[in-house]
Structures are given as C-alpha cells and as structure tokens.
Image: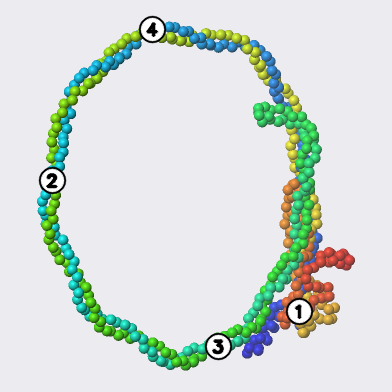
Amino acid sequence: MLKVFAFMTPVAFAASVFAQDSCQTYRLVYQTVYDQQQVTAYRIEAETVYDEQQQTTYRPIYETEMRERRYTVARPVTETSEREERYKVLRPVWETQVRDSSYDVVRQVAETAEREERYTVARQVLETQEREQRQIVRRQIIETAERDEFSTVCEPVTTYRTNYVDQGQFIETQSVNPGRVHTRLKWMPGACTVDPCSGASAYQHGGLAWVSQQGPATVTVGRAWQPNIVAQQIPQTSYVQKVVARKVPVQVARLVDEEVVQKVPVQVCRIVQEEQVRRVPVTTYRQVVERVQQQTPVQVCKMVEEEVVRRIPVTTCRMVTEERVEQVQVQVCKLAAVQQTVRIPRIVEKRVPVVYTQQVPRTVVMRVPLDPCGEVSSCCGGGAVVSAPIVSAPAVAPPAAPPLPNGTYQPAPTQKDSRVRQPAKDNGNANEAPALGPNEKVGPVDEEAEAKQRNDET
C-alpha cells in the first residue's frame, strides 16, 4: 500500500504542472516581453510679465522758521526776622538725709545626736549535690550497600544543519542629484523698498546685482544586487557521549551515637542574707539669725526745673517766578506728492506637453515539448520553444512621473529586464537540473546584449 501511494504522488503532482496531449508532453516556460508605449506629461514653464501702475510717493522738503518760546524762571528773595524760643533748664539742689543701714548676721549652732542604721550582710553556705553528666559515645556498624557506577558510551546521532544560499537578482535604482548653485550677475528691476529703521517707503532704481542660481538636476542610474536567501537542510552525523549506570556492592561502615549518663558530686556555694543593726553618732548644724542696727547720713542731689526765654534771628528764602520770551530757529519737514509709473512683475505659469516612450512588461507562457523520460525532446532543436504563446498577462500602466523641484516633469524611466531566470521545477528527481534551451541561461540577464540581439533579428 505504501509503494502504491509513493508512486501515485509524483504522478498527481506532474498532472498539475505539465500540460499533456494524447501523444506529447509539454513544459510551461514563462518569458517577459516589453511593449513600447507613448506617455504624455506636462512641463510647467514660468514667464515673468510686467504690469504698469501709477504710484504716488511723498518727498520730504525741509524749511527753517522762527518760533517764540516762553518759559518761567524762579528767582530767590531772602527775608530776616526774629522768633522767641522757650526752653527748660535743670538746676541741682543738695540735701542731707539719714539712711537705715541695719543688717542681719547668721551664726551656726552645732547639735549632736545618735541614730540606728540597719544593713544587710551576705554569708556563704557550702552544700554537696549530685549532678547528671551526659556524653555521646559513637559505635561502629558495618553494612553492605549498592553503589551506582557510571561509564561513558558514544552513540551516533543524526542532525540537520541549515545552509543558506543566495538566489538574488540585480535591480536598478535612480537617484536625483540637485544642480550646482553658482552666483551670477542679474538685472534687478526697480521696486519700492521700506527703510527698516524709519519705516519710510522709497523707490530703488533697477540695476545689476549678484544672485544665486541653481543648475538643472541630474539623474543617476545605479545597479545593485538584491539578495534572496534560501534555507536548505543538510544532514550530518555526530557521536554523542551517553552515561550508563550499573549497581556495584560496597561495604559501608557507619557510626551510631549512644548517650551515657553518669552521677557526679558537685560542691555548691549558696549566699544567705542576714540583717544587722548599729548606732551611728550624727552632728546637726542649726542657723541662728541676729539683727545689727546701723544709721548712716547721706547727701542727696535733687534737680529743680527752671524755664528760660531767648530770641533767635531767622532768615527765610522764598522763590518769585518770572516769565521770559526768546526766539528759536526750527526746521519744519513738509511732504510733497510725486506721481510716477512703476512696473510690477508677476509670474505666469503655462504647461507644455512632453511625449516620451516607455517599455511596459507583460508575461508570456510558452510550451516546450518533453520526451517520455521527462527530458527536453531532441527533435525540437535541444529545448527550443516550438509553440506559440498560450497565456499573456495584461500590461500594467506605470505610475505618472512625479514633478521635479524646479516645476518640470521628468519622463518615467524604462524598465529593463533585471530578473534572474530560474529553471522550471520538474516533477521527477529533485536533484536533477531541468533542461534549458540553447538560448536560455541561469543567472542575471545582460540587458544590453539582449537588446543588441533583438535589433539584429529585426
């Protein structure tokens, strides 16, 4: 049953891949064909147009005139007068008084007495007692046990290693490089400018000025390899060490702990507290206060207040205002209106159509005849395509070309055949490479050689 299932599986798979006739088997081969297609884009061009406009400006005119300025001046006036000032003066007056200077004298009187004093005395008492003394004794016991003995054995193990193969292809990328910026002289038309300091508007005449200008951008086409990593499983055999255990009898000696109790006599000293009484003489000192009388004459000074009057001259200064008039020269600025015609530039944009040709790819499926063994039939010239296309993929319109930074449209780049032709999968042995035609090859395709060959055939 397993042999029949293994035989039917490739047959069912081959029926889905190959197209069969009654007497001939074909293989499907995919090719890419490029069709020429014209695309119209629009380029934006800018044009400067000047509009004439009447503008009124004001020109300053300075004139000198005399003006009368009035101001007030303050003049000081001094006046002298007298004022009466009253103040008080303290005069000392001495008097004799008797002061009581009596004081107290403290005298110590000693008194002797006796008192009872009780205290505790500690006395030692020796006693003989018996104490249990416990100790551990170890006894040896011999037993027979089993021990695990380990040994190492090498065993073969098959593992799979992942090998990565690069089956990529070349791709082309485009990069836009901005043009070089250079400085050149350019005629700048006249225009009205505003002074940033005063805010006044003034007309600036046209003339040559240095301006920065950027050149046209360039497009660079680069060719790079796009990797396609495919994982493959490769078997490999290695020897792995394995640990094997076995039981071995062993003589084991172990120690058993036993507790032994002994009676030991011990001398114990015990402290007994006893209370005793003794008489202690005590001397006490008592304070006795005695008053000593003493009278002392003292001179006392008293301050008596008297009022005194005096006259003080006072000088007063007051300010008197006067009005004065003087002539001052003043410059007056008058604005005179001036009418003039000014050309104002404005930019007008227009679209110019640009027609360019691009290549649109489409896929064509071809049939290659095979012999009964699954190889390319030799009657068709060693694998050449003998039949017309049977399937054609619809052409996909490329996206519109984006505008460049300067406002123009760049034609879309033509798509070149940068694919990697892979051999078609066969339903037979996976390790056998499928047959290719005499004009086919595996790997990156040289676009310039193929274009030259198509031109020669045309």
The amino acid type found where label 1 is placed reads Ala
Residue closer to the observer: 102 or 40: 102
Quarter of the image with the N terminus is bottom right
Instruction: Determine the image quadrant of residue 240.
Output: bottom right
- Name the residue tied to disc 1: 433
Above or below, 260 against 366 in this view is: below
- Name the residue tied to disc 2: 110
Query: From the viewer's perspective, is the residue at label 2 or at label 3 nearer?
Result: 2
The location of residue 439, given as percent across then percent down, is 83, 73
| Residue 151, numbered label | 3
The amino acid type found where label 2 is placed reads Ala
Total label count? 4
Query: From the viewer's perspective, is the residue at label 4 or at label 1 nearer?
Result: 4
The amino acid type found where label 4 is placed reads Glu
Q: What element carries label 1?
A: loop
Q: What element carries label 3?
A: strand
Query: From the viewer's perspective, is the residue at label 3 or at label 1 nearer?
Result: 3
Q: Do the residues labelled 2 and 3 touch (CB within 8 Å)?
A: no
Q: Which residue is drawn at 70% across and 25% down?
A: 57
Marks 4 and 1, Cα distance to the nearest angstrom?
Answer: 141 Å
Q: Which residue is drawn at 34% across and 11% down?
A: 85
Above or below, 72 against 163 in this view is: above
Mark 3 and mark 1 lie on one chain; the one further toward the N terminus is 3
Residue 104 as seen in the image, left or right of residue 89: left
- Classify 10 Å Cα crowding around label 4: few (below 14), some (14-19), many (20 and above): few
Q: What element carries label 4?
A: strand
